[in-house]
């Protein structure tokens, strides 16, 4: 995970996942396990279950966040990056699945008035289990989404999520 404030030239936060004490959630329950293995952070969940972990950095201004992830198992499985405004109870989820699809889904207060985007099927999204790099750039009320360096949809204008926010 790499977070760059657009007012800075260098990352203000970068997780290399070498240190299990870096602030990412670690644990095991009946439906999930999260931890470190070979320098990578992982979250494994049972089918139909959802589990997230929060970045120990919360941007307050325009930012770019790049996340590398992959699914294992069924192509219907997915992984996601979420921008959360907990104070307003609003969340915007960017989900990639093993079928080369991106979904952008609002949840929380007022989500019923905001249209879900996708699924967007794009050649830049690697199908199956290979890693994909997801880059979300937030500038004011505009979001840009790139997968593996390629813009996969038109910029999204939305005031559904406001900053400061938590990244999950």
Image (spheres, rainbow, N blue to C red):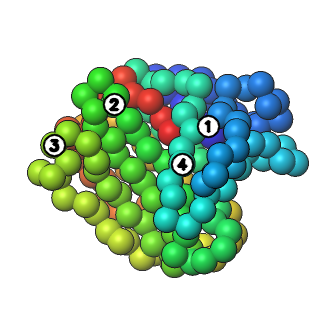
What secondary structure is marked by label 2?
strand
Residue identifier under label 1:
2
The image shows residue 72 at horizontal and vertical percentages of 68, 68
Foreground label between 3 and 1: 3
Alpha carbon separation for disc pair 1 and 4: 20 Å
Foreground label between 3 and 4: 4
Residue displayed at 49% across by 48% down: 81
The image shows residue 99 at horizontal and vertical percentages of 51, 78
Q: Is mark 1 in CB contact (under 8 Å) with mark 4?
A: no
Residue identifier under label 2:
85
Name the quadrant containing residue 41: top right
The image shows residue 163 at horizontal and vertical percentages of 33, 26
Residue identifier under label 3:
110
Name the quadrant containing residue 31: bottom right
Seen as rendered, the residue at the extreme left is 113
Residue identifier under label 4:
51
Alpha carbon separation for disc pair 2 and 3: 12 Å
Q: Could you classify mark 4 by the number of other residues whose Cα lies within 10 Å: few (under 14), some (14-19), or many (20 or more)?
A: some
Q: Is mark 2 in CB contact (under 8 Å) with mark 3?
A: no
Would you say 60 lies left or right of 90 here?
Answer: right
Among numbered discs 1 and 4, the one appearing first in the sequence: 1
The image shows residue 66 at horizontal and vertical percentages of 57, 45
Foreground label between 1 and 4: 4
27 vs 117, nearest the viewer: 27
Residue displayed at 79% across by 31% down: 20
Name the quadrant containing residue 70: bottom right
Would you say 161 lies left or right of 36 here?
Answer: left
């Amino acid at each position: 995970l790499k977070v760059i404030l657009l007012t800075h030239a260098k990352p203000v936060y970068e997780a290399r996942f070498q240190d299990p004490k870096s602030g990412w959630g670690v644990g095991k329950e009946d439906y999930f396990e999260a931890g470190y293995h070979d320098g990578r952070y992982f979250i494994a969940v049972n089918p139909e279950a959802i589990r997230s972990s929060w970045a120990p950095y919360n941007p307050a201004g325009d930012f770019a966040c790049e996340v590398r992830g992959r699914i294992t198992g069924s192509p219907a499985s997915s992984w996601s990056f979420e921008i959360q405004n907990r104070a307003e109870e609003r969340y915007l989820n960017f989900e990639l699945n093993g079928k080369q699809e991106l979904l952008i889904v609002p949840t929380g207060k007022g989500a019923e008035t905001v249209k879900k985007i996708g699924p967007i099927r794009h050649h830049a999204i690697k199908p199956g289990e290979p890693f994909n790099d997801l880059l979300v750039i937030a500038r004011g009320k505009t979001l840009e989404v790139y997968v593996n360096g390629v813009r996969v949809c038109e910029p999204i204008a939305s005031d559904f999520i406001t900053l400061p926010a938590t990244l999950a």
